[in-house]
Image: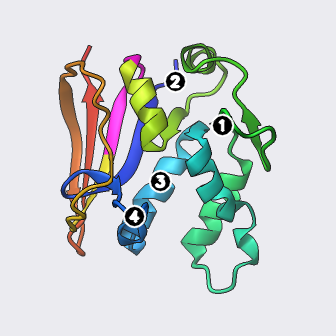
Amino acid sequence: MHKVTYSMTASLDGFTMDTDGRFDWSEPDDEVFRVFLDQLRGVDVHLMGRKLYETMLFWETADDVPGLSDAEREWTTIWKALPKVVFSRTLTSVEGNARLATDGIEEEVARLRTAPGDGDIAIGGPELAAQVAGLDLIDEYQLVVAPVLVGGGTPYFAHAGAHRQLELVEARVFEAGSVFLRHRVTR
């Protein structure tokens, strides 16, 4: 059965976007980007909300962008081939290897957990992740903590009111000061 993972970068004070909706402060260096690339290789399907879907559309045509590194080109190739499910109340169509969710989150995740394959079901975007966490469907939280304080904005962690016990599975400190943390939900 596939595990459900939630992975994003957050500021040291816990935000994925600042109060202006910006996240340029979280752009990964090469070392962190390789971690994200390794994670992506282990994903069978990526679930996201409209905002993240629109942000990630860049990668659907990024192979035309001059100056991309080899790792970014590999990311583009993997991302374009990766099946994506978009949860949106406003979109009527999506591009690339994506489809709009036809059922609720709980039903979509249940169906995807038993699908063929052995990769993860990745959750992207803090708003969708909050909903998935509220249903207790996340198995693993993967967080890159950027060495910056942004003072407010969109939080990484869902505040669904439920207590979740986590087990630290991995921790890495990167040369530029970012820290990668991977926690498994203990059930």
Circle 1 or circle 2, nearest the eye: 1
Q: Residue at x 25, y 64 (%)?
A: 150
Q: How is the image coloured?
A: rainbow
Separation (CA) of disc 3 from disc 2: 17 Å
Q: State the CA–CA distance, disc 4 to disc 3.
A: 30 Å
Q: Amino acid at mark 3?
A: Asp
Q: Could you tell which of marks 3 and 2 lies nearer the N-terminus?
A: 2
Label disc, if present, on residue 38 of the rendered structure:
3
Disc 3 is placed on an element classified as helix
Pointer 1 local density, CA inside 10 Å: few below 14, some 14–19, many at least 20? many
Query: For the residue marked with disc 4, what is the amino acid?
Result: Asp
**Disc 2 target residue:** 2
Task: Between label 3 and label 1, give the one nearer the viewer.
Answer: 1
Main SS, magenta residues? loop
Residue for point 73% across, 22% down: 102
C-alpha distance separating marks 1 and 4: 24 Å
Hey, what amino acid is under mark 2?
His
- Figure disc tally: 4
Q: Position of residue 159 (x, y in %)?
A: 28, 30
- Point out the tag, 1 or 4, that comes first from the N-terminus: 4
